[in-house]
Amino acid sequence: LVSSSLVTGLLGIALGMRHAVEPDHLAAVSTLATEQRSPRAGFALGALWGLGHTFSLLVVGGTLALLGAQMPAALAAGFELLV
């Protein structure tokens, strides 16, 4: 049997990949990337964007996991509204 942690991790990766190709992200990143001087600079900007998302998710998700807690729905909705 596959462990639930592995399944949870794979589901998180799949959902993150789906989120990354949503129209709002594609519009934002492609606009910023095309304003760069070179394709390499555009790639670097996109990579930093992704790393920033990953880092924040690991910090928040890791903290919640270590505490065995869940983010309150109202707080999650507030963060979504800010984004």
Image: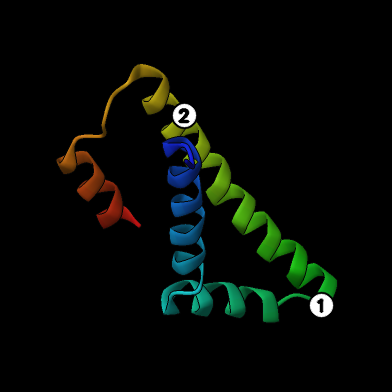
Along the horizontal axis of the image, is 28 left or right of 44? left
Quadrant location of the C terminus? bottom left
Residue that mark 2 sits on: 62
Label 2 CA crowd tier, 10 Å (few <14, some 14–19, many 20+):
few
Give SS at disc 2: helix
- CA–CA distance between discs 2 and 1? 34 Å
Q: Residue at x 32, y 21 (%)?
A: 68
Looking at the image, the residue that sits furthest to the top is 67
* Amino acid residing under circle 2: Gly
* Amino acid residing under circle 1: Pro
Looking at the image, the residue that sits furthest to the left is 74
Residue that mark 1 sits on: 39
Q: Position of residue 26 (x, y in %)?
A: 52, 77
Q: Please determine whether, in this image, residue 71 is positioned above or below residue 12.
A: above
Q: Residue at x 25, y 44 (%)?
A: 76
Give SS at disc 1: helix
Looking at the image, the residue that sits furthest to the front is 1
Q: Position of residue 5 (x, y in %)?
A: 46, 36
How many numbered circles does the render carry? 2
